[in-house]
Image: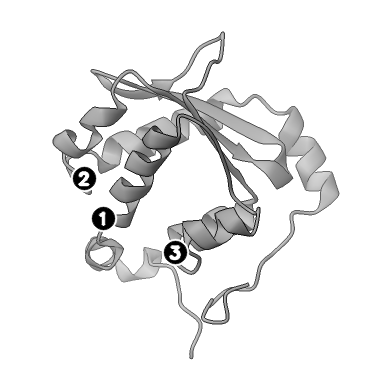
Amino acid sequence: MNPMSARPRFTIPSPVARIVSRLPAAPPAFALARALDFGVGRIVTREQVAPLAGKRFALVVRDLGLTMHVQSTEAGFRVARRPYAPDLTVAATLSDFVALALREEDPDTLFFARRLAVEGDTELGLVLKNLLDGIDWDAILERVPAVLRPRRAAS
């Protein structure tokens, strides 16, 4: 764990993982696609996501046994349909995805520690990483009502 990290790493209990791994993946993939659509035009510009057009992505939450398949279309992000053939697959534990989202961990650090796996089109992976790195999360959090903001641990 990064010594500057505000949150300890956590582990999903096995019974929870067994249940989640048996649930349909379409509802979480739909939520992911909607969240990505929400960000286009608000967090990132349409021009910034243009290199993702026509690409398929798989987001794997290892400890939940959950794989979400989404694709970028002209109409926005959508749940990918079978046959799944992702151009890029990103895999990590839920704890590591949370740490990445909160910028408590660097993707390169997680990658070299083998806690983050990126498979497929590596150039596309770099485009996605640079896109995420360019987001000013602090400015976004300022627009979120205080009650919904993630709490940071006291230093």
Identify which amino acid the numbered label 1 is placed on: Gly
User: Looking at this rendering, what residue extends furthest in the bottom direction?
Assistant: 155
Answer few, some or many: residues within 10 Å of disc 2's Cα (few below 14, many 20 plus, some between 14 and 19): some
Question: Residue 115: percent from the left, percent from the top?
Answer: 64, 54
* 78 on left or right of 140: right
Label 3, on which residue? 102
Task: Calculate the distance from the C-alpha at mark 1 to the C-alpha at mark 2.
Answer: 9 Å
Helix, strand, or loop for circle 1? loop
Q: In the depicted view, which residue is nearer to us: 110 or 68?
A: 110
Helix, strand, or loop for circle 3? loop
**How many numbered badges does the structure rendering display?**
3
Q: What residue is shown at x 80% (from left), y 54% (from top)?
A: 13
Please, which colouring scheme is shown?
one colour
In this view, 87 is above or below 119: above
Label 3 vs 1, first from the N-terminus: 3
Helix, strand, or loop for circle 2? loop
Q: In the depicted view, which residue is nearer to us: 122 or 73?
A: 122
User: CB under 8 Å between callouts 1 and 2?
Assistant: yes
Task: Calculate the distance from the C-alpha at mark 3 to the C-alpha at mark 2.
Answer: 17 Å
Q: Quadrant of residue 149?
A: bottom left
Q: What residue is shown at x 27% (from left), y 43% (from top)?
A: 39
* 16 on left or right of 72: right
Label 1, on which residue? 134
In this view, 33 is above or below 54: below
Identify which amino acid the numbered label 3 is placed on: Leu
Identify which amino acid the numbered label 2 is placed on: Val
Question: Residue 81: percent from the left, percent from the top?
Answer: 50, 12
Label 3 vs 2, first from the N-terminus: 2
In this view, 74 is above or below 140: above
Camera-near label (1 vs 2) is 1
Label 2, on which residue? 44
